[in-house]
Image (cartoon, rainbow, N blue to C red):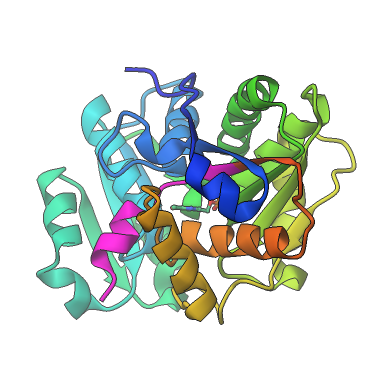
Amino acid sequence: MSVDRNVLLDSFPELNRRLGAELFVQRDDLLPFPLAGNKVRKVAAELDQLAEKPDLIITNGAVDSNHCRTVAMMGARRGISVHLVLHGDTKAISHSTVAMMLDSLGATCDVVAPGEIALTIAKTESTALNEGKVVHIIAGGCHTPAGSMAYKEIGIRVFNEVLPDIVFLPSGTGATQGGLIAASKVADSQPRIVGISVARVAERGVAPVRHAAEWAGAIDPFVEFDDRFRAGGYGFADERVNEAVALGWRNGLPLDSTYTGKAFSGLISYARSGELKGKKVLFWHTGGLWNFLSRS
Ligand SMILES: *Cc1c(COP(=O)(O)O)cnc(C)c1O
């Protein structure tokens, strides 16, 4: 099943009234994949571009990482072994649903302190190379040129169908936003791409988004990376985020407080300021249902 061409546009008339704008939603949370999200497009593109099928993929992320789960799933599907270097609480993972899922998929993992990630990856790689295996290492979050390019390609298709004035999405490592910025430069309506930071302050977050846009062919990209809705950082939420999540669900749009709820709280705030009046607004839904289900 191919995911790269899926345009999944949705609309929410009740929300239009509340926001005073015409809202479209690209539902990457509904890609044909369990607990789908933006990692599906990024990881599929990353694996599709490899010249040779690897025996082993190594990647890293938090214990609860959507990226790592997606890599485990896609590796299993393609007959490639997956080793995950996870950071976080060993106890939190040992009897968790996450561990059960990764185990069911046949992925192996190490849970290490953040400072030991690079060394653990290097050791795992060298052991596999010594055994004559072909190894592919994927950067955390699939922050890769192929991942960014995947979002450029789908961005152009979606933008040319909706002709939005402005696009909102949650932005983390920035490959998704970078790809959409590159898409905007060549799309018919050339929408503004507003990345709402889910973790990083702008000082740290803008450069990786710019790099990702350049990977996808954008020259001198302009990056709007709004860090006013991060609610204290990755995984934290405040009242504004919780309100946005609640508003989404009550209108049949599932959101989570780690990613999509933050982006939606940004969108709501722009709407309240009057900036979106009469505009065509596209909300790029990047997934996060698992994050909603697993929040404690
Ligand atoms: C990883 C993730 C993001 C962030 O994507 P980046 O390309 O790293 O900026 C946003 N939303 C969800 C649900 C994610 O899992």
| Image coordinates for residue 62, horizontal then vertical, percent | 37, 66
Question: In the image, 103: left or right of 41?
Answer: left
Using the image, determine if residue 74 lies above or below residue 246.
above
Residue segment shown in magenta:
283-296
106 sits to left or right of 160: left
**Is residue 175 visible in this depiction of the protein?**
yes
- Give the residue displayed 69% in from the left and 58% down from the top: 271
Viewer-proximal residue among 153 and 256: 256
Q: Residue at x 49, y 80 (%)?
A: 239
Q: Is residue 131 visible?
A: no
Residue 133 lies within the magenta run: no
Find residue 84 and report its horizontal and vertical position in percent. 31, 55
Which residue occupies the foreground of this view, 13 or 134? 13
Q: Is residue 145 above or below residue 140?
A: above
Q: Position of residue 32 (x, y in %)?
A: 31, 28
Quarter occupied by the N terminus: top left
Q: Nearer the viewer, residue 154 or 204?
A: 154
| Residue 277: percent from left, percent from top | 76, 49
85 w.r.t. 46: above or below: below
In which quadrant of the rendered view does residue 31 lie?
Answer: top left
In the rendered image, which quarter contains the C terminus? bottom left
- Residue at the (80%, 52%) spot, across then down: 223
